[in-house]
Structure formats: structure tokens, C-alpha cells
Image (cartoon, rainbow, N blue to C red):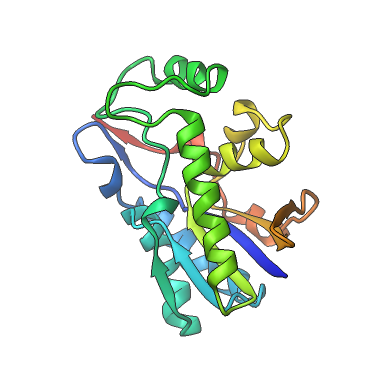
Amino acid sequence: MKTIYFIRHAQSIMSGSVPHEDWPLSELGQKQAQQAIPLLQSLGIEKIYSSPYRRCRETVTPFIENAKIPVDFHDDLREHRLLFGWIDDFQAHWAKMWKDFHFALPDCESSHQAQTRFTNALTSICKSSEHNTLGISTHGAVIGLFLHGLHPQFTMKDTKKLRNLEVLKLEFKEDAFTWHETFHLRELDKIATPHHLTPFIK
């Protein structure tokens, strides 16, 4: 059995002129990453697997350096590629992708493709890792799609409630994932921020 902790990255700075994968943490997000060190240490995480995107790397680096644990960067833990650049009606576009899991803009991923890619990556990590307690540093949209795969009642509305940063607990046993829906790090309530407060620079 593996114990898995999803770590949704701290607050970043969204930008229409900076590539999605290069969005950095905001000043507040950097503070959140530092404040998360003792919270993550309390979970007994033995190894981190992270999206290569900058905001995920910057979120877990303080914890990794303090705890002196290994990290692997896994490209398939990256965020759902909904579009290139920025569009003003992003929310409507995202809602369409939740309604039709096979819709995608050119050279982008459908919700089904992103969900399958992320789930396969997580399954492979759990099967191959020699460690029993894993931290997965990743993104809100793919977490939402993954949880929807486990529980179809988990929707876009629930995904939008995931904070920066957020920690969720799962288990992997006999090739199946179980989400511990009642798991809650109370100390996280003092430092996490709603995603809609993420600053945006055009």
C-alpha cells in the first residue's frame, strides 16, 4: 500500500505574456511554501514527485531542502493544457471542457486526455516507487479531473474550491486509488488562499 499526498502548488502569478509552465510563485506563494515546511514534515513524506512547472518546483523546494528527501520531476504530472496564451472567456471555455471531455483546441488536451495521462503517471509512480509515503506536487485542474475519475460527483465547481496551497490524502492498494475525503490539515487554513485571489498580469 502507498500513502499519497497531493500538494497543490502555492499562490503563483498568472500571466498572459509568460508561458504557462514558467509562472512563478507570488511573494505570498513563496511565504506559503516556507510555512508549509513543518506541515509537510508531519506527514512522513519520503519522496516528492513533482510537475516540472516552475510554480510546483518552487512550492516543494523549501520542504525538500529542509527534510533532505529525494525528488523526481515527472512531465506527466503537469497541468492540463487547455489553451495557449490567454483568452478573456477562459471560464466559459473551461466549463465547455468539463461538459465535453473529448473537446480540445488545436494542439491542446481534452479533459479525457489530461485525466488519463495524469492517472497513468500516478499509477506508474505508485507501482515503481520503493517508498511508501509519497508527495505529488501538481496542479488544481488535473487534481480535479483525477478526483472526478474516482468520484464522478466531483465537478468543476469542486475543483475551483481547491486552494493555493492544498494537501489531499489518498491511498493506492491493489491497483486502486482511495481518496480520504475527510483528511484535513487544519494548520493549512491559516496560510492557504482561494485560487480566485491569484494575481494576473497581462
The front one of 77 and 192 is 77
The front one of 116 and 34 is 116
Residue placed furthest toward the bottom? 68
Please tell me how many numbered marks the rendered image carries. 0
The front one of 27 and 74 is 74
Q: Can you tell which quarter of the image residue 20 is in?
A: top left
Q: Give residue 10's position: percent from left, percent from top.
A: 46, 53
Q: Give residue 37's position: percent from left, percent from top.
A: 53, 72
Residue 141 visible somewhere in the drawing: no
With respect to residue 65, does 23 lie above or below? above
Q: Can you tell which quarter of the image residue 75 is in?
A: bottom left
Residue at 54 percent across and 56 percent down: it is 122
With respect to residue 34, does 102 lie above or below? above
With respect to residue 146, does 133 lie above or below? below
Residue at 27 percent across and 29 percent down: it is 107
With respect to residue 161, does 192 lie above or below? below
Q: Quadrant of the C terminus?
A: top left
Side (left or right) of 92 relative to 25: right
Q: Quadrant of the N terminus?
A: bottom right
